[in-house]
């Protein structure tokens, strides 16, 4: 049986050593590409979640008038108010 210690020598052909180094390099590169892709997808998912929440808030608050109104709506409201006042004056006469 062979004993292993700090002075044990190992011989390996240069071709195999280069192949091992290449395999490790490819594995490390692949790992970092996968991690980068997962990070990108998580970031994209977070941005979409924020947009969906903002859209839900808009969908609920806009009809209630909590987010303001369009300029056309404001003009229409002014005209309606004016017509209501005129109608009230006519009814009083």
Image (tube, rainbow, N blue to C red):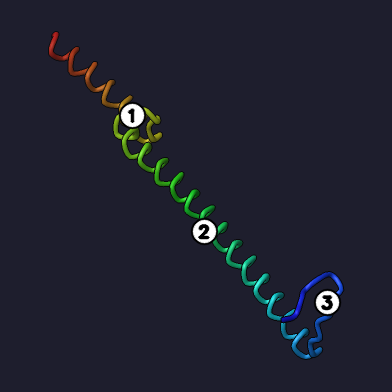
- What is the number of the mark on residue 65? 1
Judged from the image, the secondary structure of the residue bearing numbered disc 3 is loop
Residue 14 lies, in percent from the top left, at: 81, 89
Residue at left 34%, top 35%? 62
Residue at left 50%, top 49%? 47
78 shown above or below 56: above
Question: For the residue carrying disc 2, how many other residues have a C-alpha within 10 Å: few (<14), some (14-19), or many (20+)?
Answer: few
The foreground one among 27 and 77 is 27
The residue labelled by disc 3 is 8
Work out whether mark 1 precedes mark 2 in sequence or the reverse, and give the earlier one: 2
Front label number (1 vs 3): 3
The foreground one among 78 and 18 is 18
Q: Residues under labels 2 and 3: Cα distance?
A: 48 Å
Residue at left 31%, top 27%? 77
Front label number (2 vs 3): 3
The residue labelled by disc 2 is 41
Where residue 69 sits, quadrant-wise, is top left
Work out whether mark 1 precedes mark 3 in sequence or the reverse, and give the earlier one: 3
Residue found at the far front of this picture? 1
Where residue 11 sits, quadrant-wise, is bottom right
Question: For the residue carrying disc 3, how many other residues have a C-alpha within 10 Å: few (<14), some (14-19), or many (20+)?
Answer: few
Residue 55 lies, in percent from the top left, at: 39, 43
Q: Residues under labels 1 and 2: Cα distance?
A: 36 Å
49 shown above or below 4: above
- How many labels sit on residues? 3
Work out whether mark 2 precedes mark 3 in sequence or the reverse, and give the earlier one: 3
Q: Residues under labels 1 and 3: Cα distance?
A: 81 Å
Residue at left 74%, top 88%? 16
Judged from the image, the secondary structure of the residue bearing numbered disc 2 is helix
The foreground one among 21 and 32 is 21
Horizontally, is 60 left or right of 90 in the view?
Answer: right
């Amino acid at each position: 049986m062979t004993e292993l210690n700090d002075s044990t020598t190992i011989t390996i052909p240069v071709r195999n050593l280069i192949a091992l180094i290449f395999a490790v390099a490819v594995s490390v590169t692949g790992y970092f590409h996968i991690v980068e892709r997962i990070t990108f997808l998580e970031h994209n998912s977070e941005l979409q979640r924020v947009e969906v929440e903002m859209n839900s808030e808009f969908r609920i608050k806009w009809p209630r008038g909590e987010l303001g109104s369009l300029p056309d709506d404001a003009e229409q409201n002014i005209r309606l108010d004016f017509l209501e006042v005129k109608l009230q004056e006519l009814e009083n006469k």
